[in-house]
Every structure is written in C-alpha cells, then in structure tokens.
Image: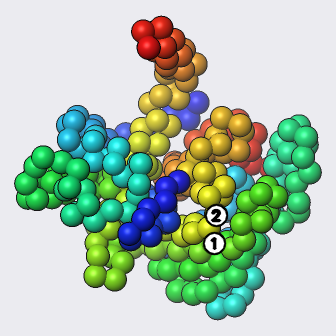
C-alpha cells in the first residue's frame, strides 16, 4: 500500500481479536477443510516444516469468476514455502500470488502469522505481510481492487475468518468469490 | 441474514473504535499512517503541533482500539495502521443497512463537491 523512505517499510500489518482458541485459528489457517470456508475460499495445502511446500488451489467459484471476467484461473493460485512452523503460535512462509500474471511476476513475498491467546478465550491474530518489491500485490492485499471483484484483501479475509469462528458462518454466504 | 447473539466483548471493541475515531488529532494520525505506514513516534510527532507526551497518549488510544499496531524493527518501534476494526464495523453495520444507500450518498457528496471545485 505504501512505500517509505528512511526506515524502508513495505510491510502491511493486520490484527484481529477472535473469540476462539489458538488451535482453532491455527487450523483455520492451515487446514484445507477450513480454508475453503472463508475469505477467497479454495483449499490450502501445507507441509508444515521448514522448506515444506505451500499451495492454495482455485475453487470452482474462483474459476467461474475468472472466466466471467475473461481470464483463465490457474489450478494453483498461491504458492510458497514454509520457513517456520510453531503450531499453534507462529507460521512464517513465503507467498506468491499466481492468479494475476502481473502479481505473479513480482515474485515471492514473506508472510507471518502470530497467534497469542489472551484473557477470556479471546485470541489475538496478527498478520504481517512483507511486500517489498511487490506494489501490485500490495494494492490487492490492501483491498484496493475490491470494486473489480478481486475481494477485499487481508481486512476482508480476517473479518470473514472472525465471523466464521465466532458464529459458525461466514459474513456473506452469497459472495460468489467466497466459497466453491 | 445471519442473526448474531450479542457478545459483550465485541460491543466494547466497537465503542473503543468509535471513541478513537471521534478525535480529529487521532484521525490525522491514521491519515498519516495511511499515506505512509510503519512510522516511528518521532516521525509522527513532527507532523503535529503537540508535545511528545500528547502524541503518545493519542497513539495509546488508537492502539487500545486496535486501529494502530506497533512492531519492533531493530531499535525502532514502528506504528502501523490496522484497518481490520474499521472493516469489522463496515461488515457488521454498513452492509446491514444496505451498501447501495451509502454509496448513493457518497456519489452525491462527490457530485456536490465536484460542482464547487
């Protein structure tokens, strides 16, 4: 979203408090049966050890939306590699968006999930996405392309995740991008 | 539409967000971070005619509301804008009262402001 001089910060930070255990949040991030139920949907596949592969697969809804907008959707829409996996507290990985050729050309970015359980069953989830050298992806992640049907980026994904874990259902079950 | 049971914690969070946003200095600080994220206290302070302590106090309120998240980078403490609480309010309130009306009002505002420009 922004570029800075001096401290050279090109990180986006998002935080949400969710009434759920850290394990439930960890599962929602890493297990395919959960990842297809919120945000962009689609199944995520993690090999949760350093060097292990990460892949997110296109949902049928995603392919359909892509076809309607006139571009093909690859089977794997995001790929990357696990750098650190400390369940259910911390996950560091590389992350490359493959759905859009321009974003794909920007290469791998670095993504960190931090999960900290607090008082009263409320858990803090912080997402830090380092988007150095990936200005196009940064706009997408910040929700800047929501009007074009590209989803609302991290804020949208985390709001949906919170809704799913706290109420058992995502925010907008009718959203065509959400679920395949 | 999904019917939600009232959760006390969520209501409290909303109150904090609205209170944090009710102050022009704090909205200015958020605008500064929106324009360029990840700033130090010193950088933010330089944009305001206010004591360091005063700016710290405002940042503290923004942090408590979840609108600002701090992270350490070496010896520096950097402040980041966290848009998620505003998104949550948007998803819970604006959607509920139909986005169409809101965007119609926003369009009207742009139109009226465009005329005077």
Identify the subunit bearing mark 1.
A
Q: Nearer the viewer, residue A162 or A144?
A: A144
CB under 8 Å between callouts 1 and 2? yes
Residue for point 65% across, 83% down = A82
- Comparing labels 1 and 2, the label whose residue is closer to the camera: 2
Q: Describe residue A21's horizontal placement relative to residue A81 as left or right.
A: left
User: Chain for mark 2?
Assistant: A
Residue A141 horizontal side relative to residue B81, left or right = right
Q: Position of residue A83 (x, y in %)?
A: 61, 86
Identify the residue position indicated by label 1 in the image: A109
Q: Looking at the picture, how far across and down is residue B39, in whole percent?
A: 33, 62
Please tell me which residue is depicted at 42% across the width and 38% down the height of the picture: B89
Residue behind mark 2: A134
For residue A136, side relative to residue B113 (left or right): right
Dot 2: few (<14), some (14–19), or many (≥20) neighbours within 10 Å?
many
Q: Estimate how packed mark 1 is, as few (under 14), some (14 to 19) or many (20 or more) residues with alpha carbons within 10 Å.
A: some
Q: Please tell me which residue lies in front, A173 or A80.
A: A80
Question: In the displayed structure, would residue B51 be above or below residue B105?
Answer: below
Q: Give the quarter of the figure containing the N terminus of chain B.
A: top right
Residue A54 - label = none
Camera sees residue A33 = no
Q: Quadrant of residue B82?
A: bottom left
Q: Is residue A68 above or below residue B75?
A: above
Q: Secondary structure at mark 1?
A: strand
Quadrant in the picture for residue A109: bottom right
- Vertical position of residue A179 compared to residue A81: above or below: above
CA gap, disc 1 to disc 2? Answer: 8 Å
């Amino acid at each position: 979203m922004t570029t800075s001089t001096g401290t050279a910060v090109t990180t986006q930070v998002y935080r949400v408090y969710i009434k759920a255990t850290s394990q439930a949040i960890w599962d929602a991030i890493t297990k395919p049966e959960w990842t297809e139920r919120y945000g962009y949907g689609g199944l995520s596949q993690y090999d949760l050890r350093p060097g292990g592969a990460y892949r997110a697969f296109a949902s049928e809804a995603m392919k359909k939306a892509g076809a309607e907008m006139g571009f093909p959707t690859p089977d794997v829409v995001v790929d990357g590699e696990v750098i650190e996996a400390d369940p259910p507290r911390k996950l560091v990985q590389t992350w490359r968006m493959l759905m859009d050729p321009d974003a794909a050309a920007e290469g791998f970015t670095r993504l960190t999930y931090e999960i900290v359980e607090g008082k009263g069953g409320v858990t803090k989830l912080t997402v830090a996405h380092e988007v150095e050298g990936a200005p196009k992806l940064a706009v997408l992640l910040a929700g800047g392309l929501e009007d074009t049907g590209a989803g609302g980026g991290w804020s949208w994904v985390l709001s949906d995740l919170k809704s799913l874990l706290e109420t058992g259902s995502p925010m907008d079950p009718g959203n065509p991008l959400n679920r395949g | 539409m999904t019917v939600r049971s009232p959760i006390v914690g969520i209501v409290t969070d909303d109150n904090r967000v609205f209170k944090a946003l009710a102050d022009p200095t704090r909205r200015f600080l958020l605008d500064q971070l929106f324009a360029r994220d990840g700033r130090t206290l010193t950088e933010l302070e330089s944009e305001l005619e206010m004591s360091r302590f005063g700016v710290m106090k405002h940042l503290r309120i923004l942090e408590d509301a979840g609108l600002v998240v701090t992270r350490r980078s070496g010896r520096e403490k950097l402040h980041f804008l966290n848009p998620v609480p505003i998104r949550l309010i948007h998803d819970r309130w604006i959607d509920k009262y139909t986005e169409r009306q809101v965007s119609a009002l926003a369009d009207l505002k742009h139109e009226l402001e465009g005329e005077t420009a």
